[in-house]
């Protein structure tokens, strides 16, 4: 008879639970990014000049990333002590409620300074939820997977990123398109932008129903059976694995920072009355849709390839390609041709998604089973606060200083890629690690 510690949920159920939940989490996160680029300056900072309003909006966007390490610490601690499944249910609930409340939040013209204050609080809640979500989802998938297919199954939560972006892009495309077609810009500024946020609560209900049906992971059950639960997982990771955490964060730098540079900040660079390119925002929504479609294929491909060639070589090759493509990508964007802009986003998404699909298993394998949730979350979310969270803000300031030239954005992307390339070079191969072990040797080259 199968023992309790060996029970596994069916592979398809694990894939569905991690994929659906993560898709909803990232949908919630991305709709804020689109709203920050297009409408929040007018709704929550109407008395600021356009440049300062955009900076303030992106500043609150960054608050979400500030909350991500906090979420990684909180849910990593309890995920390593109480289990992965419970934390995934809690994070999805927090994200759904916070996003719904953004959709009903009055603007500055109704409640004054309390509008941006409450927006900051809700954005922080979003960040905390995402900070706990990622580590739990990829670890749930990795710890349920058989060793030969760990990279592929662990990449399932990663597919939630392009799926969430597709959903966010489609919904915003619809609401902005209807506003434009009816000459109802005022309607978009007061009502229509709220629709994507309000829809979140329905999606969350679906995600919770699936997640409640998944078993706890075999690796965590073994940790409990061996009485190997650590009293303070975060402290243990920072004491014994701090170099691994730093290198993991560095390896993720360009994946996270470059993604928000080319999905969120690019909208304000290319669309709207105060943009550089003066294009319709739907050009960038459609380009993001094309890029996300590429990501749907390349994410699992990266996980599958890493099961055969190893995590490190696949990841290094992908980062090197991003480094080589940085300037050509922005040259294509500056043509103002919607087809070439879509091509630019796709060229970025191919290596980025391959690396992102590889990353899930690699981060899970870098840490022992009794501190895995904490360690993987710290590495991932530590990069997010300085890479993705600051990318739109830093890019906006760089554009202002350079007079609007895209070369400075390409240089910024190149610098982030260099950080990641050095970091992954210093991480050892992890493909053959026994993921059930609580004590792992230092996995740095």
Image: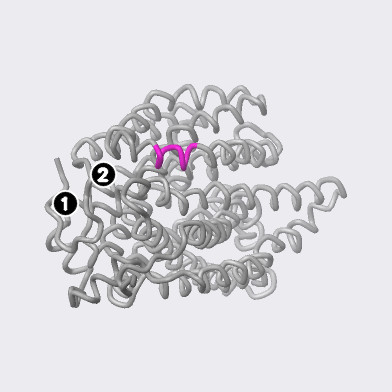
Residue 259, numbered label: none
Asked if residue 299 lies left or right of residue 243, the reply is right
Q: CA distance from mark 1 to mark 2?
A: 19 Å
Q: Quadrant of the C terminus?
A: top left
The local secondary structure at tag 2 comes to loop
The local secondary structure at tag 1 comes to helix
Residue 68 found in image quarter = bottom left
Horizontal and vertical percent position of residue 178? 81, 50
Residue carrying label 1: 243
| Foreground disc of the pair 1, 2 | 2
Judging depth in this view, the residue of 66 and 358 nearest the camera is: 358
Horizontal and vertical percent position of residue 418? 29, 33
Judging depth in this view, the residue of 290 and 261 nearest the camera is: 290
Secondary structure mostly seen in magenta is helix
The figure's colour scheme reads one colour
Residue carrying label 2: 431
Residue occupying the point 66% across, 69% down: 202
- Height in image: 54 above or below 105? above
Region rendered in magenta: 298-304
Residue 39 found in image quarter = bottom right
Neighbours of disc 2 within 10 Å: few (<14), some (14-19), many (20+)? many
Horizontal and vertical percent position of residue 144? 37, 60
Residue occupying the point 72% across, 47% down: 173
């Amino acid at each position: 008879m199968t023992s309790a510690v060996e029970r596994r949920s069916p592979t398809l159920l694990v894939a569905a639970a991690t994929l659906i939940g993560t898709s909803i989490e990232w949908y919630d996160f991305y709709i804020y990014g689109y709203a920050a680029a297009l409408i929040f300056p007018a709704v929550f900072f109407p008395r600021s000049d356009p440049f300062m309003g955009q900076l303030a909006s992106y500043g609150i966007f960054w608050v979400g990333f500030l909350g991500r390490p906090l979420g990684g610490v909180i849910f990593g601690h309890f995920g390593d002590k109480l289990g992965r499944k419970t934390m995934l249910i809690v994070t999805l609930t927090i994200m759904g409620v916070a996003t719904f409340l953004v959709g009903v939040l009055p603007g500055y013209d109704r409640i004054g300074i309390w509008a941006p204050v409450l927006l900051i609080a809700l954005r922080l809640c979003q960040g905390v939820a995402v900070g706990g979500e990622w580590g739990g989802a990829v670890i749930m998938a990795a710890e349920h997977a058989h060793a030969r297919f760990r990279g592929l199954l662990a990449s399932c939560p990663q597919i939630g990123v392009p799926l969430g972006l597709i959903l966010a892009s489609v919904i915003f495309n619809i609401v902005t398109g209807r506003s434009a077609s009816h000459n109802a810009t005022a309607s978009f500024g007061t009502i229509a932008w709220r629709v994507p946020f309000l829809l979140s609560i329905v999606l969350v209900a679906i995600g919770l129903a699936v997640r409640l049906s998944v078993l706890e992971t075999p690796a965590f059950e073994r940790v409990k059976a061996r009485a190997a639960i650590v009293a303070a997982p975060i402290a243990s990771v920072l004491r014994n694995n701090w170099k691994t955490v730093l290198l993991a964060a560095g390896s993720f730098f360009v994946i996270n920072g470059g993604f928000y540079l080319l999905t969120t900040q690019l909208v304000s660079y290319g669309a709207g009355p105060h943009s550089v390119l003066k294009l319709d925002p739907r050009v960038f929504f459609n380009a993001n849709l094309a890029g996300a479609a590429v990501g749907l294929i390349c994410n699992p491909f990266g996980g599958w390839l890493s099961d055969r060639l190893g995590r490190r070589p696949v990841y290094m090759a992908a980062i090197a390609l991003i480094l080589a493509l940085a300037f050509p990508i922005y040259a294509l964007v500056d043509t103002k041709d919607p087809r070439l802009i879509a091509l630019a986003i796709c060229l970025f998404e191919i290596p980025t998604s391959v690396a992102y699909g590889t990353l899930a298993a690699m981060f899970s394998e870098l840490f022992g089973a009794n501190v895995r949730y904490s360690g993987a979350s710290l590495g991932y979310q530590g990069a997010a606060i300085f890479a993705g969270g600051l990318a739109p803000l830093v890019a906006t300031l760089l554009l202002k200083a350079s007079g609007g030239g895209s070369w400075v954005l390409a240089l910024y992307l190149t610098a982030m890629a260099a950080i990641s390339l050095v970091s992954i070079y210093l991480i050892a191969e992890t493909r053959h690690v026994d993921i059930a072990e609580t004590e792992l040797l230092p996995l740095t080259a």
